[in-house]
Amino acid sequence: MIHTRIWLKIITLTFIAICPLLILSSCRSPASNRQRTSSAPPTRANPIITATKVPDTAYLAAEQPLTVINTPATSTITATSNPPTPVATQQPYYQIQSGDSLSAVAGRFQLSEQELAFNNPHAENGYLPAGETLWLPEGIADFAETEPFMPDSEFVYSPSAVDFDVAAYLSSAGGFFASHQEYLRSSGWTSAADIIQRVALENSINPRILLSILEYETQSVFGQPSEDVNIEYVLGNEDFHRKGLYLQLSWLADQLSAGYYGWRAGTLMEIQSADGIMHRLSPYLNAGSVGLIYYYAQNHDMDQLAEYIDPERGLPGLHASMFGDPWSRAAQVEPLLPPRLAQPMMQLPFEAGKLWSYTSGPHPAWEKNGALAALDFAPASAESGCVPSKAWVTAVADGMVVRTGAGTVIQDIDPLPGQGSDGLEQTGWVVLYMHIEERERIEPGTRLKAGDRIGHPSCEGGPANGTHVHIARKFNGEWILAGGPLPFNLDGWVAIAGDKPYEGTLVNGSQIRTAHPNGSIYTQITRPEIVEAE
């Protein structure tokens, strides 16, 4: 891990009481104020973000060590150190991290993409090469430099977790979750290990991070829950619709994804902690660290957040004590998104000559937040709503079906023509097809060619108000933004994100299709019939 210089900089922001893009309506947790009783490594202050609370204004800095000054009516958390004297002639720069794009880096530094591109004329579109330098404009506002505290590969369900066995780990830990079961309608009595694995696969969140958060919040991976832990709402979200371990973990994964992919897209630059203060995030953080900060900030004030992200006594230290050094694992698999990463050739997910509609532009791949990685298509129908369909969803590329169930089909895409699939969801290109009816659905283990039938579109497997198919891509366990640096390209139709989730267009040369839930001439799309030469 590269140690960066820490500069003391205070960024003034306008106080915002409510931030609808960042805060969900049900994030209060009675468990959030519990004191941890398990042992922790020695304290070493290394806060990622700090803030000053004054009427109508919030300030942000990242610095070490942390000094707390108590004054009447206000509480100031600021930072003190002896930062190095900057060299006046040195142009500011940023070292590229895996998954960075020009647009995302520009957003984090409060620049336009044109400003950043002007200083880096050789920078390519798509994902930038990790480790190389982007030069920043002279006179740019100084942001506090800080180190990431959790690798991206430890956050998403990446190649580094392929061999991790949740059940074996819980059994060896011997705590409450080793024997805990929960009744699910889809699978009956289900072990905690199977629930954790299911949530990890569905959301593509690393099971190690789910386990370390469970231990940090409840101390029940290695021990038994204390009296103030309500096991039905184990993570503190008391929404009845989130009752039980599966739904609590699904909510956790949703919050983690909102932070991770908001940072990846360059749309999340500040967060609101539970005490109502907006905090600017250092542009030098990584997506994995921001995902954890975002989740925890929903229910905690600044003091608690600083302890939580401490690399020794907080979650990062606990995580390392449970699973070993995450940075060593990361060194074996990162960068997850290599420079010049290209999508393999893919086609539209339906049969040639059939009329379908483009009903939703880039929107969340799973749950309600997170990566805007999915697109929706609906077959032509004389009826609206969730009605049976004779239309077929077809494979977008060659590859093996590795998992099905609850409306879901997961296909591992072969990396190159003629090469076999490794059958793993955590490596290489993977495609999710959602809302696939159980009737005539393809079986796991089936090898498909592009255009082969997968099943019928439906409303099965999740919230839906009409029969359709929902498709999304992953690479090395990370959802790929449908309208981002590497947009969906299906038969030459390229996805462009709209101003809001579910909006946007597909563009193929001069042809444009605009997403809308109600089909019209502006949404209709077909795959051309292939005419074989005589």
Image (cartoon, grey):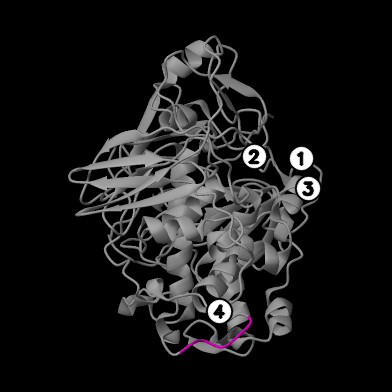
Q: CA distance from mark 3 to mark 2?
A: 14 Å
Which of the numbered marks, if any, corresponds to residue 332? 3
Q: Nearer the viewer, residue 444 or 52?
A: 52
Of labels 3 and 2, earlier in sequence is 3
Of labels 3 and 4, earlier in sequence is 4
Magenta region, residue range: 222-226
Q: Mark 4 or mark 1, which is nearer to you?
A: 4
Secondary structure under the numbered disc 4 in the rendered image: loop
Q: CA distance from mark 2 to mark 1?
A: 17 Å
Provide the residue designation for mark 4. 219
Q: Amino acid at mark 3?
A: Gln
Tell me: residue 376, above or below residue 435.
Answer: above
Label 3 neighbour load within 10 Å: few <14, some 14-19, many 20+: few
Q: Amino acid at mark 1?
A: Leu
Q: Mark 2 or mark 1, which is nearer to you?
A: 2
Q: Is residue 286 left or right of residue 467?
A: right
Which of the numbered marks, if any, corresponds to residue 110? none
Secondary structure under the numbered disc 3 in the rendered image: helix
Where residue 167 appears, as percent x and y from the top left, is 69, 79
Provide the residue designation for mark 1. 416
Q: CA distance from mark 1 to mark 3?
A: 23 Å
Point 41% across, 30% down: residue: 107
Provide the residue designation for mark 2. 337
Q: Mark 3 or mark 2, which is nearer to you?
A: 3
Residue 132 visible, this orientation? yes
